[in-house]
Amino acid sequence: MAEQPQQDTSLSAVVADIATGVALALDGGRDSYALSGVLAQDDPVALAAIRVLGADVLAPYAPYADTTAGGAAGRGAPTPPTSPTSTAGTAGTAGPHADRLADEAIVRKALAAYPPGADASDVSVWSYRGLVEASRAFLPGGSASAGSPGGQDGRPAEPRAGTDWLRTDPWPKLAHRASQLGALSLPGLAPALAEGLAARTEDLARGFVRAVRRRDWLQAAGIGRWLARVPDVPDTLGLDTGLAYVLRMSAGDPRVALHTAVARRFHGRGVR
């Protein structure tokens, strides 16, 4: 027990390092991004950090939307993800493909090491499911295996995740859970979750305002990136200004920076 605080500190530090790397990649350096390049593949703390961040560890591999024309979220057509055999960034070398293979290996280890238990919360199950889904969509073999039954491509099966809470949770609890599942707001992931949250956009907006007023910057950023993805967000919310304010007030919190980078890069919201 005496070693637990040190372990927690180490996990927090690794989570912060990964979040910083992902945010920087989304802001312009994703061709050089490699999750495996900053983590020891057999380090249990590193594997735990991957499970904490979930699908966000693969965010630099997700397809970008063109937000340069029109300047608003989702108005441009998505660009196709880089092919697993592509050598973008270093023409004529196999570097990027090798990085993705290594990243796939470490993500699989994290999934195998920390599956949700039988009594896991809905948030834990959804987070795990999202990481499995992201690994299929964004890493080598993903497009070829997307239609395969769960587990047949060597990855774990996607566990069934409850959806009743999307309809029945009171708005503060719904907004809190949405913030915890911010990683699943990446393009193309968790369509059932996105649909359920889109039906409660007003409640998400209330949660965002509440989190800002409580100065809970991490929760506000997590809710805000969902609001960046769902349709029909009222202009009166001031989401762009709100996200920029949350980032500024968070005093450099790496996870807040990651959330706001996703909202900015994939949905054109909160642009600085």
Image: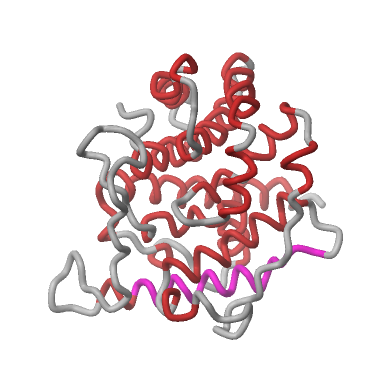
State the image coordinates of residue 158 (x, y, percent, origin top left): 65, 69
| Residue extending furthest toward the left | 92
Dominant SS type (magenta): helix
Q: Please indicate whether residue 255 sits to the left or right of residue 97 in the image.
A: right
Image point 75% across, 39% down: which residue? 167
Quadrant occupied by the C terminus:
top left
Rendered residue at 45%/23% (across/down): 239
Q: Position of residue 132 (x, y in %)?
A: 58, 67
Provide residue 62's location: percent of width, then percent of height: 39, 58
Q: Does residue 104 show up magenta in the picture?
A: yes
Quarter of image, res 177: top right
Compared to 9, does 270 lie above or below? above
The residue depicted at 71 percent of the width and 34 percent of the height is: 174
Front position in the image: 19 or 69? 69
Front residue of 225 and 45: 225
Region of the chain picked out in magenta, as a range:
99-117
Residue 63 percent coordinates (x, y): 34, 57
Whether residue 150 sits left or right of residue 28 in the image: it is right
- Is residue 186 found inside the magenta-colored segment of the image? no
How many numbered circles are shown? 0
Q: In the image, is 100 to the left or to the right of 42?
A: left
